[in-house]
């Protein structure tokens, strides 16, 4: 292991908080690790910082963004079309193919800096759907971007079009049918992107609802092995299904062309082209500004003081090879990494994962005894940053922003990384990229996987610090 974890990003309206710090020590022959006695100390500190800061973040969001309103006011203020008119019962009946909808109420209203959403309950049948409406001009966060980073508004507008295009694609449909991966369906989308004045862009989505009433739930940090493995297995299925040379690509046809047009040519929220290509130049300055927050816990580490300078010295190259399909003028890099090219979720943080436990009974005819088995299923949401990339980049994002630091102590991180790799190898054969497990290992060796993962973690540090 070439680094000490762990940091996790927590996005709020005010800041992207640095919750714990990753240390690397660039030397002429690569990166070296700190002594193991210090590793455990930082793991412990990271876990405590995650817990303390995440708790304060959740308290803030509970009061500021997840406002539970009355049924009438929630429906009145959120469930409207792009012109501001209240949605009719016919809208839901037609788009959800329900014969009789007499009324609806909104019992859960969610307001955050990316838009407004509501869980809609239809009467008399009791069906539910999840409605989201985005109008940049009404969002304080978007107005701030207009002043400080206007290019991000056009980026964000495109990201919502990616959601609509991917969820509506045959590629998404066949992925779900073939692999069993759970992705909520899209009943309806309305979009009015404005390329001249992106702040005026508007979007609305009506999604299939993974509802708590049906047993779906979220975890703010995954702190048990079963949840981590279920999420990693789901990501492995997606990566293998769309891997370069898989049956999906061999079958060709309109589905492949549709997917190429639907998603980002280079996926991931963290990539330099999505955050500002010169962001890496501010790493040293930003580390100097932020490091005092962690002085008490981390200053005994001899490497902590000039982390920013050392990370900045490699940040640009880390971004380049972590996202090898981003540049228009680097065909050599594209070709070098083409054999690893796959679909990536792009933002597999904990908030974009939902879980559902299914109990099933098994009866034995011989003993007349019955037993039950439990299966943990994972649902994935929010495909704004989905595009082509490296599987290891998705895994680095997942481990650093969805998994609790305590899960990574000692051999914990290695266990998770190996579990994903084993599943990926299995699915590369199952979905047609390779004929045998040995061929899969030759295509994507464990060493290559870990090297790409390590580099992606460093690239994440660039984002979090800068």
Image (cartoon, rainbow, N blue to C red):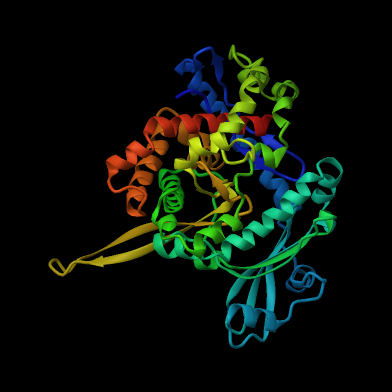
Up-down relation of residue 264 to residue 201 (above or below): above
Quadrant hosting residue 52? top right
**Residue 328 visible (yes or no):** yes
- Residue 2 is situated, as x and y percent measured from the top left of the image, at 48, 23
- Residue 68 is situated, as x and y percent measured from the top left of the image, at 72, 62
Quadrant hosting residue 466? top right
- Residue 110 is situated, as x and y percent measured from the top left of the image, at 70, 60
Q: Residue furthest left?
A: 366
Q: Residue furthest right?
A: 147
Instruction: Say left or right for 69 vs 304.
Output: right
Q: In what quadrant of the picture does the N terminus appear?
A: top left
Q: Who is closer to the viewer here, 299 or 15? A: 15
- Residue 179 is situated, as x and y percent measured from the top left of the image, at 40, 59
- Residue drawn 80% across and 49% down? 141
- Residue drawn 43% across and 54% down? 241
Up-down relation of residue 324 to residue 351 (above or below): above
Q: Who is closer to the viewer here, 55 or 101? A: 101
- Residue drawn 49% across and 21% down? 39
Instruction: Say left or right for 24 vs 288.
Output: left
Q: Who is closer to the viewer here, 76 or 436? A: 436
**Residue 56 visible (yes or no):** no
* Number of numbered labels in the structure image: 0
């Amino acid at each position: 292991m070439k680094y000490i974890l762990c940091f996790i990003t927590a996005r709020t309206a005010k800041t992207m908080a640095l919750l714990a710090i990753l240390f690397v020590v660039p030397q002429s022959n690569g990166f070296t690790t700190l002594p193991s006695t210090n590793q455990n100390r930082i793991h412990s500190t990271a876990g405590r910082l995650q817990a303390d800061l995440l708790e304060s973040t959740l308290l803030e969001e509970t009061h500021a963004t997840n406002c539970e309103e009355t049924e009438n006011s929630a429906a009145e203020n959120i469930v409207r079309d792009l012109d501001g008119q209240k949605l009719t019962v016919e809208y839901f009946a037609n788009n959800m193919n329900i014969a009789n909808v007499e009324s609806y109420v909104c019992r859960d209203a969610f307001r955050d800096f990316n838009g407004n959403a509501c869980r809609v309950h239809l009467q008399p049948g009791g069906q539910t759907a999840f409605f989201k409406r985005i109008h940049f001009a009404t969002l304080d966060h978007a107005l701030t971007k207009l002043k400080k980073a206007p290019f991000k508004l056009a980026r964000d507008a495109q990201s919502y079009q990616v959601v609509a295009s991917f969820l509506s694609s045959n590629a998404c449909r066949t992925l779900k049918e073939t692999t069993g991966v759970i992705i909520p369906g899209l009943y309806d989308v309305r979009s009015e992107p404005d390329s001249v004045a992106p702040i005026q862009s508007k979007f609305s989505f009506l999604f299939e609802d993974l509802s708590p009433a049906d047993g779906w739930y979220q975890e703010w940090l995954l702190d048990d092995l079963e949840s981590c493995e279920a999420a990693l297995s789901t990501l492995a299925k997606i990566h293998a299904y769309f891997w370069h040379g898989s049956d999906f690509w061999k079958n060709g046809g309109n589905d492949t062309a549709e997917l190429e047009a639907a998603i980002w040519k280079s996926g991931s929220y963290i990539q330099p082209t999505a955050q500002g290509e010169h962001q890496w130049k501010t790493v040293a300055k930003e580390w100097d500004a932020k490091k005092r927050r962690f002085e008490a816990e981390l200053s005994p580490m001899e490497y902590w003081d000039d982390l920013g300078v050392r990370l900045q010295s490699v940040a640009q190259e880390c971004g380049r090879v972590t996202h090898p399909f981003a540049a228009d003028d680097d065909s050599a890099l594209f070709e070098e990494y083409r054999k690893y090219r796959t679909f990536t979720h792009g933002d597999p943080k904990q908030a974009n994962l939902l879980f559902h436990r299914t109990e099933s009974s098994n009866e034995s005819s011989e003993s007349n005894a019955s037993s039950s088995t439990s299966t943990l299923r994972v649902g994935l949401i929010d495909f704004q940053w989905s595009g082509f990339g490296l599987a290891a980049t998705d895994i680095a994002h997942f481990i650093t922003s969805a998994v609790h630091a305590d899960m990574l102590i000692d051999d914990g991180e290695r266990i998770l990384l190996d579990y994903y790799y084993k599943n990926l190898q299995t699915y590369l054969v199952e979905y047609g990229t390779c004929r045998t497990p040995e061929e899969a290992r030759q295509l994507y060796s464990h060493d290559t996987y870990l090297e790409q993962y390590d580099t992606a973690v460093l690239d994440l540090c660039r984002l979090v610090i800068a």
